[in-house]
Image (spheres, grey):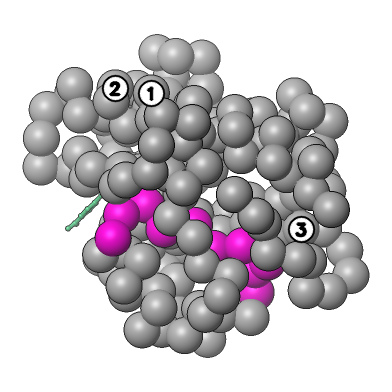
Amino acid sequence: MELPAKRGPGHYRVAIVCLGNICRSPMAQVVLTDRLDKAGLTGEVVVDSSGTGDWHVGGPMDERAAATLFLNGYDGSAHRAAQYTAERTGEHDLVLAMDAANFADLLALGVGDRLRMFRDFDPDGPGDVPDPYYGGADGFERVLGMVERTADALATSLEHRS
Ligand code: 4NP
């Protein structure tokens, strides 16, 4: 999967976007940042996350998402939810949507050709990262599994970015 070119000087900027920015995209931000650090790309590639909705802006991660991360060796405690708005479409080199609805919402906001599905980088094949918000704890474990294997592949792509 081809990565969009860097649009300006400085680091390569990646946005990960879901609906509420308290479950899927912050989990993916924490895991991808971990993989980039391990690949020696700290500061060269910078990841943030946001949601198309504004309900949780300023708040912490969903406690089930934070617990799933913690039980697997990650720290999600620094997260504060943010919204992705039309004013932000020039901020990032790559914008990753967690599901098809997020993708459609981001297209409508004007993200354009920098938009990809997060799981376009999943070695097990593309698809949605399903929203775990209204389900049980197993949904968060499933999300983490998808996010970990996709973040591994994405970090490799970012490392070998031309
Ligand atoms: P996320 O999950 O998009 O993975 O953060 C959701 C969180 C909150 C809501 C929906 C999805 N909500 O409707 O408040």
Give the residue type at disc 1: Gly
Query: Is residue 17 in view from this perspective?
Result: yes
Q: Residue 133, position in %: x, y? A: 18, 43
Crowd around label 3: few <14 · some 14–19 · many ≥20 (10 Å): many
What distance separates the C-alpha of mark 3 from that of mark 1?
Answer: 25 Å
Q: Which residue is mark 1?
A: 145
Q: Which residue is mark 2?
A: 141
Q: Earlier in the sequence, mark 3 or mark 1?
A: 3
Nearer the observer: mark 2 or 1; the answer is: 1
**Res. 88 image quadrant:** bottom right
Q: Which residue is mark 3?
A: 12
Crowd around label 2: few <14 · some 14–19 · many ≥20 (10 Å): some
Residue range in magenta is 91-100
Residue plotted at (49% across, 31% down): 123
Give the residue type at disc 3: Tyr
Give the secondary structure at mark 2.
helix
